[in-house]
Image (cartoon, rainbow, N blue to C red):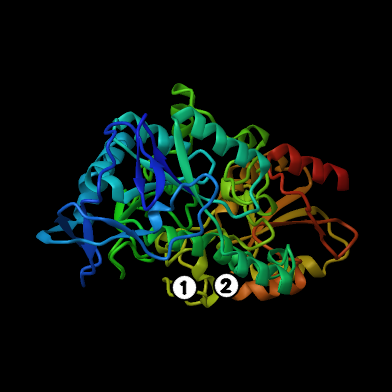
Amino acid sequence: MAFAVTSSSSSTAISGSSFPRSSASPDLKVPQIGAVRLADRHATVSLSRRRCAVKPVNPEPKRNDSIVPFAATIAAPEIWEKVEVEDFEQLAKELGNASPLEIMDKALEKFGNDIAIAFSGAEDVALIEYAKLTGRPFRVFSLDTGRLNPETYRFFNEVEKHYGIRMEYMFPDAVEVQALVRSKGLFSFYEDGHQECCRVRKVRPLRRALKGLRAWITGQRKDQSPGTRSEVPVVQVDPVFEGLDGGIGSLVKWNPVANVDGKDIWNFLRAMNVPVNTLHSQGYVSIGCEPCTRPVLPGQHEREGRWWWENAKAKECGLHKGNLKQDSAAELNGNGNGASHANGTATQSDIFNSQSLVTLSRSGIENLARLENRKELWLVVLYAPWCRFCQAMEESYVELAEKLAGSGVKVAKFRADGEQKEYAKTELQLGSFPTILFFPKHSSKPIKYASEKRDVDSLMAFINALR
């Protein structure tokens, strides 16, 4: 992500460097709002103060473009004048049916210079468009991990020119990156998971950026990741990161498009003729670092293009850890504290429900696997109902089952999470959910479907090639 300030024809010097700002007011305003920690996690204390000098604390090294990391500065107040308590949980309820434009306007109005938009280089460019439409000054930041696609870097440049802004790019600590790469290599995340790399390249730079703010604006949507983001509010006290005044409760997080569907975001971008990342036209939906992002295929959820070699529960990098549902996929098999059934599986309504589908029990799948001369061919999906990628292919798999009814191919499902997961991994080639197996007539060993194209035509082509 990167920091940008919208700019007009004027700029004001801060700590010896110029920092351009946006237009609604050409004068650089001194931050007017502060916050102190409260026992109540849903409220912050806002403090107005007199004009004060801005003092950088632990500033980053100066760069050639002379943009000072404004988000990494701390304003030292001279006199505290009044205190007022803001209940952001109540505000979230009041804004529950508000438009993204109204929510954006409220956020910029409340926090002025102390808030910034977090821009990832994807469809969250809509946030910048909404901010522009409010007519208020706004700032934008982005994290440059050093591993982004070339198209994303070009998109950053296009956005800056389109809106007349300068984004502030936050970079990972060079020493930390060097230590990680020297000890584990450039692609260690393919072997031991992406969390460590994301922590160094994304989470820590974000933490530094947010320490200079009292609020930030994100492009999180509930439909982006039903398993982890379905309860994202439009505004909240950030439960994880700290703001300018330090301590949990010192930072407010705004999610103006939380209640907006992805298709409506795209309708808005097209209607406003907003520039978009060219990767979207190549099949990319959710865009991150180049080694960890790929296009999604028919029947796949948008987040399945991220960290595809890992299990479904790991499809978050840590930037929005505070919004993860605690009873979601991350709770599976004792890995969390969410509600669970007695057999250790997460509480979740079942999927792939159709009279054309056979539901296999543990003994049923064991018997099927032992048979060497089957009377019929079998296609079986190993699934977990909480897995959003399983949910994404439900419609196509049910349609396939109905299409194959009476054809000599049985279509079945086996729930392979919870107590059944270890068995499925050792005996049924389960790597991640969903896994699709084809059981031929004259072999006990099933054939694993290797492609991630889970539309009806692709699955049918797989079956026809084997029967």
Residue 467 visible in the shown view: no
Q: Nearer the viewer, residue 255 or 48?
A: 48
Please name whichever residue, 139 or 404, is drawn nearer the observer in this view of the structure.
Answer: 139
User: Residue 144, how many percent across, how many down?
Assistant: 57, 51
When the figure is inspected, residue 201 is found, relative to residue 124, above or below; the finding is below
Secondary element type, mark 1: loop
Q: Which residue is mark 2?
A: 418
Horizontally, residue 316 falls left or right of residue 383, namely: left
Residue 146 at least partly seen? yes
> Any mark on residue 341, and which?
1
Q: Marks 2 and 1: CB-CB under 8 Å?
A: yes
Horizontal and vertical percent for residue 113? 29, 47
Q: Residue at image x 72%, y 68%?
A: 191
Q: Which residue lies at the image location 57% right of the left edge and 45% below the top edge?
A: 286
Q: Nearer the viewer, residue 279 or 463?
A: 279
Q: In the rendering, at what x and y percent does residue 203 appear?
A: 50, 62
